[in-house]
Amino acid sequence: TSGVLFRTEKKLLRTQLSLVNKVLARNPKLAAEVLPVVADAFGHEDSEVQERALQVVARHLKAVDEQMCRELAEAASLLGPAHRSAAEAVFGGRLGAPERLPYEEILPPVPEPQFLPGPEGTLEELVEDLLVQQRSDSAMEYERALDGLVRHAHNNKEALASQLREAFADAYWQNANGFALHRDYDHFQHGPRGMDAVLASVLGKVKPERIEAGRNQPVPMTACVHGAMEASHEIRIWEIAHLIGGGTLPLLLSTPTRHTGGIDPLELVRRLREYVEAGLEPAPVDLGHALLRVRRQDPSADRAAEEAEALGSAAGARLAAWLRSENPLEATVRFHPRKEKESGRWWLVDRILVETAKRPEFRKEFPKALHWLGGGLLPNARRCYHWEQVPERWATLLPADRELLAACLLSSMASAVDGDSTRDVTGPLTLLAEGEGRVGRAVALVLAFGLGCRDADDRLRAVDALLVLAARGELDARQVGRDLAWLLAERSMKPNRLADAARTAAATGAYRTVWTMLSEALPPLLEAEQPMRGLGELLAIAADCVERCGATGELAGLERHALGRGTSQLVTQARRLRNALRQGTGQGTPETA
């Protein structure tokens, strides 16, 4: 019995409790041995399992001594508030009075900023890190290695080339091991392949015409946002490959200083000052990426703007103006309505349209590679073929503009909601939650999509992002709930996945946050003519949250189900939620712990 009662399958547990009841009815002498094991189910997450365990204990309590009764009564403290009155009837005076403490919402601590290490040290350390980075997906290690390459090429290109030639002797771009059909084979005709084009450029292994073509490649303006993001990244790499050969760049302006991809304003001013003192002009795409990454909401932004302006350079003036701007970038998310009469499935990912707001001044100041962010990207309904790929470097492109970043990530999340194989797409949500910039509808949508992902690990990362935003006071839980209601009503999201995510979030102690979200998600489902399968499970989680946080009020559509006949989970949990809302004691203030 003990092995089964630790399982999560509710039907299995209910069956086992029924069998235990029958065995004890035939052999009461086993009660002293079996009932403590049954009492372990008092702490189960499912309310019905708790109720059945209490019923089994109640029926066979007379078969144990007083000491055992007191131990069972102590275990009853694990029962949810809904079973308190029933437990009092079973155990009487043995059950102590519950502590009446004000409710406190438990939210995770606000994450401390993580700062990246300084520039690469010796040339040997750089080469060692480059070899490790070839097998790593870390965007920050990638950025730091790029900056190290630029710095060492500026100081001593010959020494760098010698080390790279030896360390990467077997690299495909050196025409090694007969990889190419002939020595003039263009290894980079389909892109820079991470930073390989930069490494090869140091050794003169990239055709000049390929570098020029890469630098001047057009950004697809009628494609998905992923195509534009990837093209912007590639153009930046080709620009570095072009300039590193001459060793003219002393450092990269766009190297992040924080794990989210953000750059501290005063650090960017310091880098620009180094350019001014060397009499050099910044590379256009490098400067553009640096401006996108600089933390405009940082407390030092005003001081940094003054110092940037004092540099007397065009780049310094641009940085000052950018730091003083408000919400310079925006995106609108729209959806095609579901076409029920069409043959085949109308996937959620096909229905998302992201349109960047027109910003003529942005397009004047930034290079062509980034014009799509200022209104150049046109929405269309063609299927996005990038949506199973979510490289971390995409999330670090816009660390200071979370709304725009969230809009860019929506199609990736959507594919993991109504797809069967897509996974590992919610990693950027961590950077999104800890980033900068406005939080609005796009962030709420991407969280809603994340909570409904097929993969459990994806849902867990979405829950973490939800709680971090709540702890920072930036979560619009009601908007997330409304978006969840829409996804559920259109059958794009499965209720059991949302139930799993909501249960996980509530178990951390964030009962009021989860209830606020579910209070918006549930009414459209309760008012639907045909109840959705799995609705009872969502009501059970909502009832548990209400019982613990003491919320009160009415929920549209709930009464109809609470008055229903039978003992189905939907009817049982609807009654439980209705009673909890009527008996609430008021909500407390959220606290972090």
Image: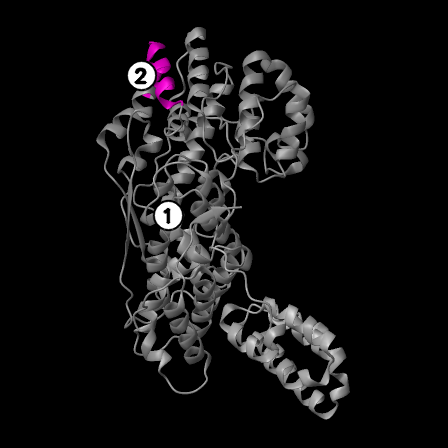
Q: Position of residue 71 (x, y in %)?
A: 69, 71
Circle nearer the viewer, 2 or 1: 1
The magenta stretch spans residue 317:
yes
Indicate whether 126 appears above or below 100.
above
What amino acid type should be assigned to the residue bearing mark 2? Answer: Ala
Which residue has dot 1 on it? 443
559 sits left or right of 48 in the view: left
SS category of the residue bearing label 2: helix
Q: Magenta: predominant secondary structure element?
A: helix
Q: Residue furthest front?
A: 93
Q: Residue furthest bottom?
A: 26
The quarter of the image holding the N terminus is bottom right
Q: Position of residue 154 (x, y in %)?
A: 54, 14
Indicate whether 232 appears above or below 426.
above
What amino acid type should be assigned to the residue bearing mark 1? Answer: Val
Taking the spot 59% from the left edge, 12% from the top edge, the residue there is: 156
34 sits left or right of 532 in the view: right
Q: Position of residue 406 (x, y in %)?
A: 38, 45
Kindly indicate the quadrant of the structure image that contains residue 450: bottom left
434 sits left or right of 156 in the view: left
Q: Disc 2 to disc 1, how far (Cα)? A: 31 Å
Q: Is there any visible trace of residue 295 in the rendered image?
A: yes
Q: Position of residue 43 (x, y in %)?
A: 60, 68
SS category of the residue bearing label 1: helix
Disc assigned to residue 317: 2
Q: Is there any visible trace of residue 425 in the rendered image?
A: no
Bounds of the magenta span? 300-318
Taking the spot 32% from the left edge, 72% from the top edge, the residue there is: 343
